[in-house]
């Protein structure tokens, strides 16, 4: 009864339109845009943003910085040079299947929101950036928070939060046309129009884009179309905005890496889609592709009663539907729940086949807050509630040995996930220069999966059956102090608790009768900043202590998939350094570095079901050193920026074996630009980005494993696959603003 009452209270808050906003009146304020004596009240939704006095490590990117770096690549490329960030691209070009890690934390543990609305897939917790092509062109600002960060809607932040806002409406009629073209037939075409203020109250913005690339990796092509539409009504202290964006993606699969032997022969080789007859590759399947359509809708209502009180509510709905098709070689029919077939009097149990995996999902909800801002204190109370409904099913659509084989469905399962949370925040100026920050969140999740999965269960000789009904209740407090002194100096410290539920794969790839538990983390951080017009300096210390972190152990589940288990104790600790110097009006330079230790305590590695005590080991994909530098020249409309990033060695498994590593790499990019302003057009910007300027042959990600040819670790053998990144490449762009 108590739980039902809590849910009713959350729902009532949602109906009342209460949405979480910034503690210093930035979270849901009406910004007045003045232009040609015309005033537009534009809602600036920056939910859950950290401010100058919030004791949380974060980096901001402005609209101008985003525009200057926008050549059509996915959002991870935009973040490449931020502190503690490592990016990777399966196609090698930064377009298509891309991802990023922060402090070694994988994408499923990074909370991503746009205007406060969750972007992470409710089941996998990942964000598939090609589902929202050219989203960069619609962004107004970006903030990357490292660590637990502030309370936010959606999946728990276990290493970082990426908070994005959509671009504000223009105050007068304007537009933008952009063209990009470069290596690997990478191209972008974009047109955007803004109505300006209509009738004193209305504003409309629209964008259409098309992106395509052959990819550096063979056949890793992308064909992406996207749109964005925004209509706003502004009247005094009230505003209503409708935002819709999304796209259609077709991406040739490239999620299988290449072995060192293959890479030595042809580092661009893509084994996906191989057609193998006998023991020879005779060709590649043309439609070995991932196809997906996603449409995101947001309705934002914002009202400010006075200078102190404001209310805001956002209703959102995301529709997604798609499939990927595979050509699979030498497959056991029983793995698809199929009986052997007779062909010309011979019983066939293995054959090449075509399969299609389909998913459809609906995700909707509401986020809301009430904020109060006074001279010395800011309060925010907020809620979020969402419901995810998804279906997965797969078909065998053709057998090479039996051309007349009818399309046969071999699995179908359903998922529903209810996610509700509420929080309260306070930012209190205790005395001059000293701010207390406190943030308390409660979150409830109900996750249900039922039906038949795509994994064959050897213990039952049938497709895996799913009957999962899990409930989670998380209480996440955060507390910190920020002290500013001598105008330019500040110190801060914070402690925060984060908790996160398992992903879909953590449930489906298990031993029978076993289920994962939620992960927990205590994040303790402290730092120092020094900011003047000439120098910006930052030092941040962090210690992230995990309990029951889910990691892959090397074991195989009953269905033959890699198994993740909760490990009792693990941690990440390190120091983040940043420096920027405005040496002159036309030259600036700087850099950042992260030095860290990332360990599991008492780790047990499993190889061929044999357990080996490994003691303290390094967490996979967690480099000890991440560093970057930049040199920026800018004068009379011309700009040149040379940026370099270095990533040290990474282990590909948690067993810490030297033959299962990703080698360190260092790569530099050169960005040249020239902005021309004329009377006829607002401005024209010409840009050229030369990626991997010094032609480094590096890999940004990979995977591997071990097997035994005996009974001891001395008998261990290994295999490894890598994802090569593009060598020197160029991408040119011209953008006309009118």
Image: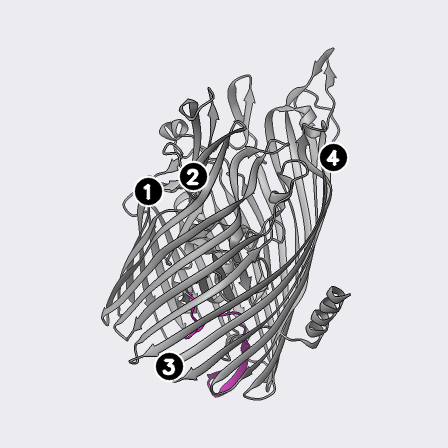
Q: Circle 2 is placed at which residue position?
A: 615
Q: Circle 1 is placed at which residue position?
A: 664
Dot 3 or dot 4: first in sequence order is: 4
Question: Disc 3 and disc 4: Cα gap in Å?
Answer: 65 Å
Would you say residue 528 is visible in this rendering?
Answer: yes
Q: Quadrant of the C terminus?
A: bottom left
Front of the two marks 3 and 4:
3
Q: Circle 4 is placed at which residue position?
A: 409
Disc 4 element: strand
Disc 3 element: loop
Magenta residues?
28-56
Q: Is residue 274 magenta?
A: no
Disc 1 element: loop
Question: Disc 2 and disc 3: Cα gap in Å?
Answer: 46 Å
Foreground of the two, 170 or 577: 577
Q: Which mark is residue 433?
A: 3
Foreground of the two, 116 or 673: 116
Residue 569 falls left or right of residue 6: left
């Amino acid at each position: 009864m108590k739980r039902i009452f809590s849910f009713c209270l959350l729902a009532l808050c949602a109906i009342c339109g209460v949405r979480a906003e910034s503690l210093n009146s930035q979270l849901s304020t009406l910004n007045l845009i003045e232009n040609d004596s015309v005033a537009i009240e534009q809602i600036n939704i920056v939910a859950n943003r950290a401010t100058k006095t919030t004791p949380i490590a974060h980096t901001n990117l402005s609209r101008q910085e985003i525009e200057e770096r926008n050549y059509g690549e996915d959002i991870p490329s935009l973040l490449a040079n931020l502190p503690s960030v490592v990016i990777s691209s399966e196609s090698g070009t930064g377009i298509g299947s891309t991802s990023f890690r922060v402090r070694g934390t994988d994408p499923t543990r990074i909370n991503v929101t746009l205007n406060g609305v969750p972007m992470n897939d409710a089941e996998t917790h990942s964000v598939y950036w090609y589902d929202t092509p050219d989203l960069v062109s619609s962004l107004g600002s970006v903030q990357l928070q490292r660590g637990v960060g502030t309370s936010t809607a959606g999946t728990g932040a276990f290493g970082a939060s990426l908070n994005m806002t959509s671009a504000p409406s223009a105050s007068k009629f304007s537009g933008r046309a952009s063209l990009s073209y470069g290596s690997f037939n990478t191209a972008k075409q974009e047109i955007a129009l803004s109505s300006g203020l209509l009738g004193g109250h209305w504003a409309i913005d629209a964008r259409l884009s098309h992106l395509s690339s052959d990819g550096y990796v063979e056949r890793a092509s992308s064909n992406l179309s996207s749109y964005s539409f925004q209509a706003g009504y502004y009247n005094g202290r009230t505003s209503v905005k409708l935002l819709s964006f999304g796209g259609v993606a077709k991406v040739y699969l490239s999620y299988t890496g290449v072995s060192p032997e293959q890479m030595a022969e042809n580092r661009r080789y893509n084994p996906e889609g191989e057609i193998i007859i006998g023991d020879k590759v005779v060709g590649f399947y043309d439609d070995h592709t991932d196809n997906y359509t996603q449409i995101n809708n947001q309705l934002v209502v914002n009202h400010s009663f006075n200078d102190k009180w404001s209310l805001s509510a956002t209703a959102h709905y995301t529709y997604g539907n798609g499939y990927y098709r595979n050509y699979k070689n030498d497959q056991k029919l029983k793995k698809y729940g199929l009986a052997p077939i007779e062909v010309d009097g011979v019983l066939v149990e293995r054959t090449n086949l075509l399969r299609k995996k389909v998913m459809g999902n609906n995700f909707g909800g509401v986020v809301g807050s009430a904020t109060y801002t006074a001279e010395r204190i800011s309060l925010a109370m907020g809620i979020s509630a969402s419901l995810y409904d998804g279906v997965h099913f797969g078909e065998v659509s053709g057998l090479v040995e039996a051309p007349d084989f009818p399309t046969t469905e071999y699995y179908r399962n359903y998922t529903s996930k209810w996610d509700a949370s509420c929080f309260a925040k306070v930012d209190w100026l205790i005395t001059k220069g000293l701010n207390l920050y406190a943030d308390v969140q409660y979150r409830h999740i109900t996750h249900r999966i039922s039906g038949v999965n795509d994994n064959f269960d050897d213990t039952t000789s049938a497709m895996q059956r799913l009957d999962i009904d899990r409930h989670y209740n998380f209480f996440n407090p955060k507390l910190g102090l920020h002290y500013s002194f001598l105008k330019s100096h500040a110190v801060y410290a914070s402690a925060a608790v984060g908790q996160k539920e398992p992903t879909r794969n953590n449930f489906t790839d298990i031993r029978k009768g076993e289920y994962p538990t939620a992960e927990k983390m205590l994040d303790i951080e402290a730092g120092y900043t020094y900011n003047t017009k000439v120098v910006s300096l930052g030092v941040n210390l962090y210690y992230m202590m995990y309990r029951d972190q889910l990691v892959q152990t090397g074991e195989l589940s009953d269905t033959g998939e890699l198994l993740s288990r909760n490990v009792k104790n693990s941690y990440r600790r390190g120091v983040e350094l940043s420096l920027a110097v405005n040496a002159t009006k036309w030259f600036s330079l700087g850099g950042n570095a992260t030095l860290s230790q990332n360990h599991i305590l008492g780790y047990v590695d499993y190889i061929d079901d044999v357990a080996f005590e490994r003691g303290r080991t390094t967490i996979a994909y967690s480099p000890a050193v991440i560093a970057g530098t930049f040199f920026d020249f800018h004068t009379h409309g011309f700009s040149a920026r040379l940026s370099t990033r270095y990533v040290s060695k990474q282990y590909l498994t948690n067993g810490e074996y030297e033959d299962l590593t990703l080698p360190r790499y260092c790569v530099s990019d050169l960005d040249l630009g020239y902005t021309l302003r004329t009377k006829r057009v607002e401005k024209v910007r010409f840009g050229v980005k030369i990626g991997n300027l010094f032609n480094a042959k590096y890999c940004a990600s990979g995977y591997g494993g071990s097997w035994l040819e005996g009974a001891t670790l001395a008998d261990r053998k290994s295999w490894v696959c890598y994802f090569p990144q593009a060598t020197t490449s160029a991408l040119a762009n011209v953008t006309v603003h009118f």
